[in-house]
Every structure is written in structure tokens, then in C-alpha cells.
Image (spheres, rainbow, N blue to C red):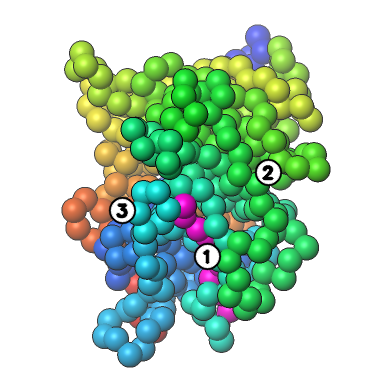
Amino acid sequence: MLTLALVAGCVLQGPPPPRLRPRAIIDVPSFAPEIGAFSPAHDVFVHIDACWRTLEVYQLRWSNPMEPPTLVALDLDEDRPGIQGRPFATTPTSVAAHPTVPVAIVSSVGRFVEEPGQVTAIDLRPQTLGQTLWTQGVGHHPDSVAISPDGRWLVVANEGEGDSRASVAPGSVSVVKLAGTDLLAHRRFHGALESWQLDVHEGLALDAGEVEPEYVAFDPGSRFALVTCQENDGAVVIDLGGPEPKVGAKVFLPKGSEPDGCAVLDGYTDPTFGPGCLIALAEEGKFDEQGRWLGQSVSFHWLGPEGLWSKSVLLSRLDVAAAVGQSGKETCPESVLLKRVGEHTLAFVGIERAHQILEIDVTDPRAPRTAGSARVGKRPEGLLWVEHGGVVWIVSCDEGDDGPGEVSFLSVTAAGAPQPAAGRRASAPAR
């Protein structure tokens, strides 16, 4: 079956977009899986649990590349009953895995509002699993951490306090240089890596500190990071192309959009604006004084020109609440992935309150089209893109609704290919 797509004024024929298929919802021995990461070095999957203040660790076992893996929960404390993750003294907020080195970096808040947070490097090697390698101070209330695809940079969105305490706990962006350092050395040091604390409030907030960086996504070429500022209805580019990181272009959204997750796709050439990147922002939205839900959309923007990243242009906005049949209700688009699959460019959006992942065809980002949706566990938070054995998987950390959460696996398969079996319910065995 062929579909018609209108691109730059021309009608083109092409195959229908790949299909998003729910494959497994896995009960895990954790209360609230939230943000996850995958370390390819040893096929290790980790996620934070802010409720239990732990990093939970699993071995991925693929018996058949066409089927979801088994998640084997690893016990990091054999002296205590049950499956124990790696505990933290304060609340962990995010985690990222290095693309080549078996290390996870976890952000955690300070002990009180005025105390800055930190990131902790956790060893993922089997013989030293869960051990602390080193720590590094960052800004106040770190909320998201990401590692560049080339492994050279760590960027942290520090939410701070956007109220009367903003002067003592300002929002900021921390950039840490990982290049040139043996990340697996057990140094037990604090703050020894070269780092920068960037003030991003200008143009996004009226007063210094009253800016709330929320989420970090990297350009696939590691040239810049995109950081959403949720309460400021915008995002900021952190340019990594010079001798030192610097604040670059800003993206502005309508009042009440409140962007949360974001994604970047490189190699996009707009017919009007030329070569650049395509970016997507999941706009969580808010309930205003007139009883209306604002935001609750996903927007697509051109960012360029290539190499300068000095300008952004809104290309389109899609109403997520309407797309999942919940217009006028709270849906909370939380996270977004932006990928090319075959001839198509696709966005996958985690809809927290609808317990769904929404698939959007943005091959023409000026005219996005809903391509389908799939149910996952309750309240999906973080989304991961994993490729294994030629199969594309989306992994969703589902926080749960006042109860134990889950981890969901979905496959992305060509529409004309044999479709896999429907989703199944499973539990993570322990080791």
C-alpha cells in the first residue's frame, strides 16, 4: 500500500511509516522507574527510583533478537533481603550511560535547598558493579543529565528554585568535560573535572535565577546540547563547538507551553531556511486561570544555520491531547524521541496521563501526521531508543500511579513486514 505525502509543493509516493507495536510490559522490583539508560558495554539497563532513592540495575538477556529481552534484576546488597539497588543519600533525579565506557552518571539534589547538587559516576563493570567512581559538583537541584554521543561532554540542567528562593538556589546549566579523563578510575574525588556553570536566564527570565532548566538532549553530532526551561516556556542551545561551551540560540514558545522533554535530529534541510537541525519539544502544558489546558502539544522547529545555531523557526505544532482522543483533559506530553527509520522521520512522544506512546510522522515537519499510538505501563516518563540485532526498540520507564511502576518494550517495524505478536505481561527475575 502506498501513501501520498506533500513535500515542498510536490506530491511524492512512498511506503507507509513503520508501525509502533507494544511487545512487553515488565513488572520490576522497583516502586517508581522514572529515567533510564542503556549501557551497551555489558548490556546493562539502569533506571533511577526517586521514591526509594536508588539506581536500579538490570542485565538485558536477548534470547531472540526479534523478541523483547528478559530483564534480570541485579541485587547490589546481598546482606539485605530482596532486590536492592544502589542507594543515594539524597534524591536521584536523572541518569545517563556513557556510549562506550561502562559507567552511569547519576544526578542528585543537595541536602537542602541552598546546597548545590552533584553527579556521581557509578561503575557498571560486573566485578565492581555499583561502586562509586567519582563525584562532581553541579548547580542547584539538577533535574536532567545527558552525555554527548561522542562521550566528550556531560551537560546537566539545574532546575534551581523559581520562587522567592531563586537568589540562593538559581537555575543554571552545568557543562563537564569528560574527554581526556579515565572515567573508570576509582578516584573518590569531588569536583576535579573541568567544568562550567552557565547562566541561561537572559532572554528567558526577568530576574536572575528565575529560570528553570528541565531536560537535556544532544545533537547527534555532539556539536551542541538543547536544554528546555519549563517554567519559562522556552529552550536554550549550549554551543560546544568552541574552546569553551557558551549559551547560543533560544527557542520561545507560547505562554503556558511548559516544555519538558526535547529531541534533536541532524541533517535536516528546510526548503526555506536551508541546512540545520530539526528539534522537537514535548509541551507538558498547564491549567490556567480560565480553566483551560495550555500546551499539551509537541512542536517542531528548524534550528540553524548549520554551524552557527543562532536562530530557530517554528515549523508546526500538533495537539497531543486531540491526537490521543482526550481533548480538554490532562495528558502531559512528557518525553520525545526524534529518529529516521527508512524513508520516514518519526517522533515518539510519551503521554504521561494517557499511558501511551504516540507515533508522529514528521517526514514533512511542516505537516506532521499522527501515525498511531500504543499503550504502555502507567505514567510513562523516560524514553530510550535501543537497536539490537537489526530490530529497533523503544523502552519506556513507567513511573506508576501511586503504586509499583513498570518498564515497557515496544518495537518499530516496517508496515509491510510480518508483524510480531501482541504485547505480553512479564516480571523481571532476580539474580
Q: CA distance from mark 1 to mark 3?
A: 22 Å
Taking depth in this image into account, of 291 and 365 the one nearest to the observer is 291
Determine which quarter of the picture holds residue 351.
top left
Q: Is residue 81 visible?
A: yes
Of pointers 1 and 3, the one earlier in the residue sequence: 1
- State the image coordinates of residue 399 (x, y, percent, origin top left): 31, 53
Residue at image position (54%, 52%) is 138
Task: Name the residue carrying label 2.
Answer: 220
How would you rate the neighbour count of disc 2 (Cα within 10 Å): few for under 14, some for 14-19, many for 20 or more? Answer: some
Taking depth in this image into account, of 312 and 298 the one nearest to the observer is 312
Give yes or no for contact between labels 2 and 1 (Cβ–Cβ under 8 Å).
Answer: no
Residue at image position (36%, 88%) is 78
Left or right for 264, reference 207: right
Instruction: Tell me which amino acid carries mark 1.
Output: Thr
Figure check: 76 above or below 152: below
Looking at the rendering, the stretch of residues picked out in magenta corresponds to 116-126
Which-is-in-front pick, marks 2 and 1? Answer: 1
- Is residue 119 magenta-colored? yes
Instruction: Tell me which amino acid carries mark 2.
Output: Pro
Figure check: 230 above or below 219: above
Q: Quadrant of the C terminus?
A: bottom left
Task: Name the residue carrying label 3.
Answer: 399
Q: CA distance from mark 2 to mark 1?
A: 24 Å
Task: Name the residue carrying label 1.
Answer: 120
Task: Single out the residue that lies furthest toward the front.
Answer: 168
- State the image coordinates of residue 110 (x, y, percent, origin top left): 41, 56
Instruction: Tell me which amino acid carries mark 3.
Output: Glu
Which-is-in-front pick, marks 1 and 3? Answer: 1
- State the image coordinates of residue 16 (x, y, percent, origin top left): 54, 32
- State the image coordinates of residue 184 (x, y, percent, origin top left): 65, 74
Left or right for 429, reference 35: left
